[in-house]
Structures are given as structure tokens and as C-alpha cells.
Image (tube, rainbow, N blue to C red):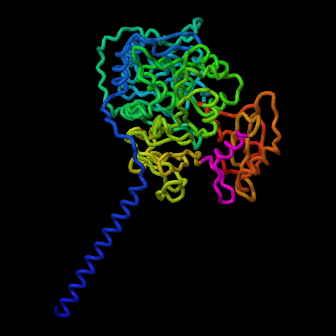
């Protein structure tokens, strides 16, 4: 081979080698990036192009005479056939009476009452959009949501009528009222809800429904700014109901048979996504009997167990802490319970073990994860998996953990922000395309929650990123300190927040309540915590004993409210919490 030919040959080899190296690096990067995506280990399920009424009405026809929902306080009850028929009546009557069209918004401003099920299915069947509003909302909060959502009609109770009337953004907005007490009378300027649901549907109004149509517009909690309308399509909702119930090893409720029907207390507000999707829609889909509670209180909670053979409980950590720390709940009352599902915030493995031990029987404690924007369920714990985790991704769902600052993908045991992709993720925020673009990238929803996952791909919820406390560059998770403080004698409840500090940036401060008739030495509590954590996690912000701790409308402890209260106390001298 001549010199020129040899040189040319070597150049060709060099180019080929370079191409090969580049291809390898590209492949390596692709596979490296791809390996950080954690798919569900469970088999994917078929999600039909069906609407919510499609799947719920079909199920109602299986056991039409069984009780679907009953009010714990008044005893009002409806069978599955009554729910179906009255919802159909409402779907026709509300369109004709108010000349509503596809996509118009109706505000459901209700506590947990049996009629909520009729409202939900009737409005969805009419291809209207439901915006749910907490019955605890103030007049200002109600007016803001009615304005932002563009609501055309309000459905509420007779007792909430005055609040609704004071809040309507336009004169003469129709208000439908539900009688929840025997002594209730329909206000003179209101419309009797019962008349609409009892008007036989002639089915002369043609309503065309598609699974892509918007069905639900709950509003975010507003802890990082004003609340935003969250848009869910029918397919989002049906997908999540099916994801939660298609596979036996992760399902909470057992499908009703001729000999068995789960009895479930409806203490979570239906106006929140967890209560609406998991409890209401999940209960109707499985043909469970839901026992509604208009207003939660410890007395009513205990009475629920005394009066009903409850088999499943949807709840939040604060309720479980009440059960295990209060002497008001007799363990014998828990004997009918088969499963407890916990959401909205993390509950420590120790607390779960204490609850199971207290019950004296094998209860399946299922801690899952969802959010206002990505559905009722994104992860769930398998029946035989370890306590403390929020479990694995549900079917048809992918997850990854990324760095909070640089969004670089992280591997197992590294702490970062959880991103989720799946058919349950919201369509976007109402009239806020820029906010939507910030929150969803290439189908990935950025949750704002700090998590990690282990070698078995079980995920662990650490805390909300916005709740994290930054001490001299170190990041402290309030949940870690809260779990330690709860183990101290006579502590009933606890919230830890970060407060501004000139030298450290922020320092942890604990707010606690104590068990009835007991006192806690706060200096000894600080010393107790100090022995169990690194020095930067010490409670340098102090410990305050309170009569009660603030909660939001869903029953979650409200960290942001305490931060705002602290800022008011110090005269707004710092602007870190806005």
C-alpha cells in the first residue's frame, strides 16, 4: 500500500472511529438518561375513551338497589339507581332551565352531603364543568373563585345560601339550594334543587360527550400565590379511577358483590381532589356505601365507628395521629377495618406501626401519593411492601427525580424534586398558559415535592420543597424533625417551620400541642431533639406550645399560615415568606 493510500485509509479509519465513538456516547447518554425514568413495575392497563358517567352509570346498574350514599347525621340515603336517575334528571333540567352549553362552569359549594354524588354525575353528564369550592371558604374566597372560573350557576345548601348570595360576582346568578335538614326552607330568591332532580328526564336535550372534554376545575390551595383553576378532562378522571382499581395488589376498595359491600366514611372533603376522585368516584365505581359527614369533629369521627361497621378509611396523617394519641378511640371500634389509605402528607413508618398495633389486627395501611394537579393517585404501596414508603408508580405512569436547582436526573437514594408523567396529569391551568408551561415540560409535571427512591423503586416522600428549611446552606426537612418530636412523651401534634435568622439564614421552630391534661418542658424537648440530629437541625427557633395547630381545608397542617403569623408577629421585618 502506497503512502498516500495509507494516509487516506488511516483518515477513513479515524473518521469511522470518531463516528463510532460519537454513536456510543449518544447511546450512552440516551440510555443513561432513560435509566433515570422509573416506569410502573405493574402492567399497563387499557384506558378506554370513556367519560365519567359512562363508567359510573354502568357500574350502578349492577346493584341498583344497594345504598350508595347515606348522611351520618340525618340518615338521608340514596340507592345507586336513585343516584343514576336523579343525575340524569339534573343533566337535562339544568341545561334547559338556565340555557347552559357545553363547557359552561357550575360551582359546587357544598359540604359532604349525599346530594354531592347527584350533582357531580348530573353536571358531568350534561357536559358542564364542575368547579368545587370548600364550604369553609370565606365570601371573598368564594367570589374570587366564581370570578376566575366564570361560573354560571351555584349549587349549595340552604345554610350556605347567604354566603353564596353575598359572593355572586354578577346580579341574579342562579343559586340552587339543597335542603339538608327537615327544618330547611328554600330561600325566596333561590331555586329548589330537589325540583330539578325530581323532574323526569325526557332526554330531549342532546348532549354529546367526549373523553377529551373538560370535566372538573378544582382550585389549588394557593400556598404559593393566588389559587389557580386546574383543568381535568373526563379521560384524566376515568384513567385515575381505573389506575387505582384495576389491579388487586394495590386497590383499596373491594368491588361490591351480593354478599359484601365496603362501608366507607366520607370525612375527606369532596371539594378536594383526594376526596372527589379517590373517595367519591372510587366509592361509586366500586359500589361501596359512602357515609357522608358534613362537618368533621372528633365526636362525630368516634360516633362513625360506633354506628357503622366501617371497612375502609380514606384519611390524612393528622387523623391517624388523633387515633393513636387520643384515648377517645377504643381499639375495639377498629375491628371491622380492613384497609386504611393515607394521603396529602407523609406519615412515618413508626406511626403506621403504632396504628396497626393499636388495632390489634392485620390492617393494610396504604400510603400513596397524588396531588391537585396529577390526580388522586400517582404512587401506591403494594400490600406486602415495607411501611413508610409512598410505594411504586401506578400503571401507565412514569416518574423521575431531578435536582432542585439544575433539574439534572438523580439516581436512587438521592433527594430531589419528583416529576410525573401519565394519563392522570392535568391538562393545564385555567387561563394561565405561562403557569402551565412552567409546570409541565414535555408531558412531565413538576410536583414541587422532595422525594427519593430505593433500589426496589419504592418512593419516599420527604416534604414539600417550599417547606424546606435552609440553614447555613444545609437543607432541613420539617417532616424529619416532626417525626422525632412526635416520639416525645405527651406530644399530640407538631408543625415545624423555618424562621428567618441573621446568622443562619433560617432556623427550625416547632409548634406543638400536648395531650389533654399534660404539660411539656420545651427546654427538655429541644435537648431531646438535639441529641438525635446534626447541630444545624437543632430547634434554634424555639418551641411554642399552642392550643391547636392550623389546618387547611383538606385537614393538612398549614405550614404557610404559621409562617405568615410569625412574620406578622415580628412586624414584617423580613420578606422571605411572601
Q: Please state which of residues 71 and 32 is positioned toward the viewer in this rendering.
A: 32
Q: Residue at x 48, y 59 (%)?
A: 408
Question: Is residue 474 one of those drawn in magenta?
Answer: yes
Displayed quadrant of residue 306: top right
Image x and y of residue 131, in percent: 47, 29
Where is residue 209? Give x, y as percent: 31, 27
Find the residue positioned furthest to the front: 361
Above or below, 28 relative to 65? below
For the image, the number of numbered tags is 0
Q: Work out whether residue 236 can be spotted.
A: yes
- Vertical placement of residue 354 versus 3, above or below: above
The magenta stretch spans residue 120: no
Determine whether 209 is above or below 307 in the image. Answer: below
Q: Say if residue 233 shows up in the picture.
A: no
Please give the name of the residue rendered at 16% of the width and 91% of the height, measured from the top-left corner.
1
In the image, what residue occupies the spot 65% across and 32% down? Answer: 321
Task: Point out the stretch of residues depicted in magenta.
Answer: 466-487
Which of the pair 174/203 is nearer the observer? 203
Residue at 37% across, 41% down: 396
Residue 568 in the image: state x and y as whole percent. 74, 42
Amino acid at each position: 500500500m502506497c503512502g498516500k493510500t495509507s494516509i487516506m485509509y488511516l483518515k477513513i479509519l479515524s473518521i469511522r472511529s470518531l463516528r463510532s465513538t460519537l454513536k456510543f456516547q449518544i447511546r450512552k447518554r440516551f440510555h443513561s438518561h432513560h435509566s433515570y425514568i422509573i416506569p410502573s413495575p405493574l402492567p399497563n392497563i387499557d384506558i378506554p375513551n370513556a367519560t365519567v358517567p359512562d363508567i359510573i352509570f354502568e357500574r350502578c346498574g349492577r346493584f341498583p338497589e344497594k345504598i350508595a350514599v347515606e348522611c351520618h347525621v340525618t340518615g338521608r340515603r340514596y340507592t345507586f339507581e336513585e343516584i343514576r336517575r336523579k343525575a340524569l334528571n339534573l343533566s337535562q333540567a339544568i341545561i334547559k332551565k338556565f340555557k347552559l352549553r357545553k363547557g359552561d362552569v357550575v360551582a359546587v359549594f357544598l359540604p359532604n352531603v349525599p346530594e354531592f354524588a347527584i350533582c357531580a354525575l348530573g353536571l358531568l353528564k350534561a357536559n358542564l364543568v364542575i368547579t368545587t369550592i370548600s364550604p369553609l371558604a370565606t365570601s371573598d374566597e368564594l367570589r374570587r373563585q366564581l370570578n376566575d372560573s366564570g361560573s354560571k350557576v351555584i349549587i349549595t345548601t340552604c345554610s350556605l345560601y347567604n354566603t353564596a348570595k353575598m359572593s355572586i360576582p354578577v346580579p341574579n346568578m342562579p343559586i340552587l339550594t339543597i335542603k339538608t335538614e327537615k327544618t330547611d326552607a328554600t330561600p325566596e330568591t333561590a331555586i329548589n334543587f330537589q325540583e330539578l332532580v325530581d323532574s323526569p328526564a325526557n332526554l330531549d336535550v342532546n348532549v354529546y360527550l367526549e373523553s377529551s372534554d373538560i370535566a372538573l376545575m378544582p382550585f389549588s390551595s394557593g400556598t404559593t400565590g393566588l389559587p389557580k383553576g386546574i383543568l381535568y378532562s373526563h379521560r384524566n378522571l376515568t384513567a385515575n379511577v381505573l389506575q387505582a382499581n384495576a389491579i388487586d395488589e394495590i386497590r383499596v376498595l373491594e368491588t361490591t358483590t351480593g354478599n359484601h359491600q365496603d362501608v366507607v366514611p366520607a370525612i375527606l372533603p369532596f371539594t378536594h381532589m383526594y376526596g372527589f376522585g379517590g373517595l367519591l368516584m372510587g366509592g361509586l365505581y366500586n359500589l361501596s356505601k359512602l357515609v357522608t359527614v358534613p362537618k368533621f369533629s372528633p365526636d362525630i369521627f368516634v360516633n362513625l365507628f360506633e354506628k357503622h361497621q366501617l371497612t375502609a378509611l380514606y384519611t390524612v396523617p393528622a387523623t391517624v395521629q388523633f387515633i393513636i394519641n387520643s384515648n377517645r378511640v377504643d381499639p375495639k371500634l377498629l375491628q371491622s377495618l380492613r384497609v386504611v389509605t393515607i394521603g396529602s402528607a407523609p406519615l412515618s413508618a413508626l406511626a403506621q406501626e403504632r396504628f396497626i398495633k393499636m388495632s390489634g389486627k392485620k390492617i393494610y395501611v396504604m400510603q400513596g401519593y397524588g396531588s391537585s394537579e396529577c390526580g388522586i393517585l400517582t404512587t401506591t404501596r403494594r400490600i406486602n411492601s415495607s411501611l413508610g414508603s409512598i410505594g411504586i408508580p401506578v400503571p401507565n405512569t412514569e416518574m423521575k427525580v431531578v435536582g432542585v436547582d439544575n433539574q439534572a436526573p438523580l439516581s436512587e437514594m438521592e433527594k430531589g424534586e419528583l416529576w410525573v408523567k401519565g394519563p392522570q396529569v392535568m391538562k393545564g391551568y385555567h387561563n394561565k398558559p405561562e403557569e402551565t408551561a412552567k409546570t409541565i415540560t414535555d408531558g412531565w409535571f413538576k410536583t414541587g415535592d422532595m422525594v427519593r427512591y430505593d433500589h426496589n423503586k419504592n418512593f419516599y416522600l420527604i416534604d414539600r420543597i417550599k417547606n424546606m428549611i435552609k440553614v447555613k446552606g444545609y437543607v432541613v426537612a420539617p417532616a424529619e424533625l416532626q417525626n422525632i418530636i412526635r416520639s416525645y412523651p405527651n406530644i399530640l401534634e407538631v408543625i415545624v417551620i423555618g424562621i428567618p435568622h441573621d446568622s443562619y439564614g433560617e432556623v427550625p421552630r416547632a409548634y406543638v400541642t400536648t395531650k389533654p391534661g399534660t404539660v411539656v418542658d420545651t427546654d427538655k424537648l429541644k435537648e431531646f431533639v438535639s441529641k438525635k440530629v446534626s447541630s444545624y437541625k437543632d430547634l434554634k427557633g424555639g418551641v411554642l406550645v399552642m392550643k391547636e395547630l392550623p389546618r387547611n381545608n383538606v385537614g393538612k397542617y398549614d405550614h404557610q399560615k404559621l409562617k405568615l403569623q410569625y412574620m406578622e408577629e415580628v412586624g414584617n421585618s423580613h420578606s422571605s415568606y411572601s
